[in-house]
Each structure stands twice: as C-alpha cells, then as structure tokens.
Amino acid sequence: MTLSIHASYLPADDLEASLSFYRDILGFEVREEDPSRALVGAPGQPRTSIVLQSPVADPELTEEERVTIAELMAKGTYATILLATRDVNATFDRIQATGADVVQEPIDQPHGVRDCAFRDPAGNLVRIEQR
C-alpha cells in the first residue's frame, strides 16, 4: 500500500490574516477559498495542500474544548508545520523583511539540519529547514 499526503490542517482564527501570510509572505498558491476555509499549497506541488480553517468551527466541540483551543493558540502551542527550502538564510531574510514574527533565526541543529522558525498570524509555529 502506498499513501500520499493530500492535505494537512492548520488553525486560522483570522482567515484573511492567515491567508495573507501563506499567500503573500510564503508564496503559496490559493487553491480554494470560501468564507470558512482556504486551501493553499506550494507552487509545483498541486497534490498537497494546507487547509486553513477555524479550529473552533467544528460543531462537535464543547465550549470547554473551544476555550482550550483558543488558549493554546494564543500561547502558540497548538499547531506546527515544517517546511523545507534550499537556502534557509535567504528564505529567512525574505520572510523577516515582511515583519513576520520571528521565533528563531537560522541555526545549525544537532540533528544535522539548519533551520529557522516564525509564527503565523494564528500563532502556529512555522519551522523552515534547509534540505
């Protein structure tokens, strides 16, 4: 059996701000958009998308769960995505110049990659490593 990744979800409490970050700052394509969610993805990778949508829109969540999710998002500990680039220093410089929220400047990690990190408008950690 062979599986592939079709889509991954990231919470977006302000869809327009998140869409602007992934489209205008990271350079992702907008593949689908409606008032409650947006699908974005890297150019040249049409079969893999990120779904940006409100995590509290799920009607099956209790009020307590909604509050917990909102608290975790505010702390920036709810979701993470790992992206890859050929030149992490140039990518970092380009993203930092937009005023994006820097979490970590490029550094060499003990496990053999060089990476950096930002927070998107919803507080999600966006790690970018050099491949």
Image: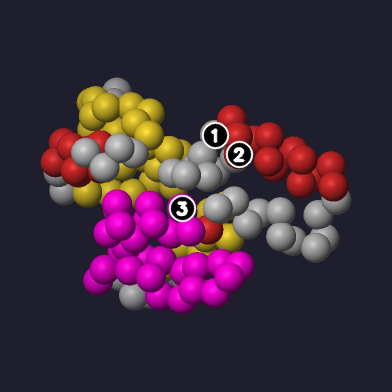
> Marks 2 and 3: in contact by CB < 8 Å?
no
Tag 2: residue type? Answer: Met
Tag 3: residue type? Answer: Ala
The quarter of the picture where residue 97 lies is top left
> Marks 2 and 1: in contact by CB < 8 Å?
yes
Which of the labelled discs sits on residue 76, or is there none?
Answer: 1
Q: Which residue is mark 2?
A: 73
Magenta residues span 16-44
In the image, is residue 75 above or below residue 125? above
Q: Can you give x and y, in whole percent of width and height, for residue 20 in the image? A: 39, 57
Q: Can you give x and y, in whole percent of width and height, for residue 107 in the image? A: 24, 25
Q: Is residue 112 visible?
A: no
Spatial CA distance of label 3 from label 2 is 15 Å
For label 3, the SS is helix
Q: Which residue is mark 3?
A: 17
Residue at x-position 80% and y-position 63%: 59
Q: Is residue 90 visible?
A: yes
Residue at x-position 40% and y-position 75%: 31
Mark closest to the chain's N terminus, 3 or 2 = 3
Tag 1: residue type? Answer: Gly
